[in-house]
Image (tube, rainbow, N blue to C red):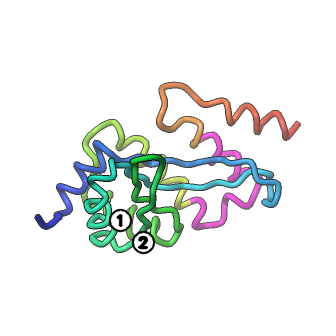
Amino acid sequence: MALNPDWLSGFIDGEGCFHVAVNKNDGVRFGYQILPELTVVQHERDVNLLNRIRTFMGCGVVRRNHGDRFCWRVRKLDNLINTILPFFEKHPLKSRKSVDFHKFAGVVRMMAKGEHLNQAGFYQIVKIASEMNTQKPKDIRIKIESTRR
């Protein structure tokens, strides 16, 4: 079966995750690394599907996630800007996940402009990330904001 864009958009709507990680890393400017990614996790029996998605999209990696789970993951900023964002803007998500996609797209575009390298942009991205994939803000923002006092 050949993949088509509408099927893929629907599949990602159900199985994908647009995520912005904020990871402690003393080697970067504000002590935290911002890492946007699109991830799809599937059982190992469907690893061929993940490889077909990677080929169809022309970016990302397929790796073992844990145990019998594999993931297709796109982290490279250039791929997010030039492939992932345009694809989902042309083939929009239909579920509430579209809200997270728009937040994700905003973060990726801010990073493409280098805004994560200045304090105001960094804290704006952390705020957006804390409000994604959840009904309430995550405590990461509280931890980071407490370090800037």
Mark 1: few, some, or many residues within 10 Å (few <14, many ≥20)? few
Furthest-top residue in view?
A: 136
- Looking at the picture, does residue 126 appear above or below residue 44? above
Q: What residue type is labelled 1?
A: Pro
Q: Which amino acid does label 2 sit on?
A: Asn
Query: Mark 2 near mark 1, Cβ–Cβ under 8 Å?
Result: yes
- Residue 134 image point, x, y percent: 49, 31
Furthest-right residue in view?
A: 149
Query: Which sits in the foreground, 115 or 78?
Result: 78
Q: Residue at x 58, y 59 (%)?
A: 110
Residue labelled with disc 1: 86
Residue 82: numbered disc: 2
Mark 2: few, some, or many residues within 10 Å (few <14, many ≥20)? few
Q: Is mark 2 on a helix, strand or loop?
A: helix
- Residue 88 image point, x, y percent: 32, 57
Magenta residue check for 115: yes
- Residue 119 image point, x, y percent: 77, 52
- Residue 4 image point, x, y percent: 16, 63
- Looking at the picture, does residue 30 appear above or below residue 147? below
Q: Which residue is drawn at 50% across and 38% down?
A: 132
Distance, label 2 to label 1, CA atoms, is 7 Å
Where are the magenta residues, as a range?
110-127
Q: Which residue is drawn at 44% across and 66% down?
A: 61
Residue 17: numbered disc: none
